[in-house]
Amino acid sequence: MATEILAVGTAAATSGDVIVASGNQLTVGLKDAAGPIVAGGAFVEIQLKADSGEYFTIAALSSASPGLIIAGAGTYRFSRPAGVSCGVFSA
């Protein structure tokens, strides 16, 4: 079942933590309010939480690469800079 991680918007925003348990995978994708094709320039960083509590950017979703599978266990969040309208969902 699809779940919203980061609501569609144009303002800078960061999702809450998303935990991927050991042995599990999470498929994530970009979305926008206009439909299944996200606008050019849409961009969201995927960040991994370190043992220090800091977040480090490890990958990104973009209009050119709108989906991926997170296969590593960890605590992640999704960070959108201000700009093109987009959001993130998981499936």
Image: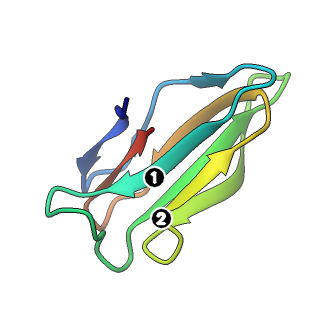
Q: Return the residue at label 1.
A: 29
Farthest residue in the front direction?
1
Tell me which amino acid carries mark 2: Pro
Residue 37's disc number: none
Kind of element beneath mark 2: loop
Name the residue that disc number 2 marks. 66
Between 6 and 27, which is closer to the camera in this rendering? Answer: 27
Amino acid identity at mark 1: Gly
Residue for point 85% across, 22% down: 51
Q: Quadrant location of the N terminus? A: top left
- The earlier-in-sequence mark between 1 and 2 is 1
Picture coordinates of residue 32, whole percent (x, y): 24, 58
Q: Is residue 23 above or below residue 71?
A: above
Query: Residue 84 occupies which quadrant of the picture?
Result: bottom left
Determine whether 14 is above or below 37 in the image.
Answer: above
- 79 vs 32, left or right, is right
Q: Secondary structure at mark 1?
A: strand
Answer few, some or many: residues within 10 Å of disc 1's Cα (few below 14, many 20 plus, some between 14 and 19).
some
Kindly report the distance in space between the C-alpha atoms of the residues bearing marks 1 and 2: 5 Å
52 or 60, which is in the foreground? 60
Mark 1 vs 2: CB contact within 8 A = yes
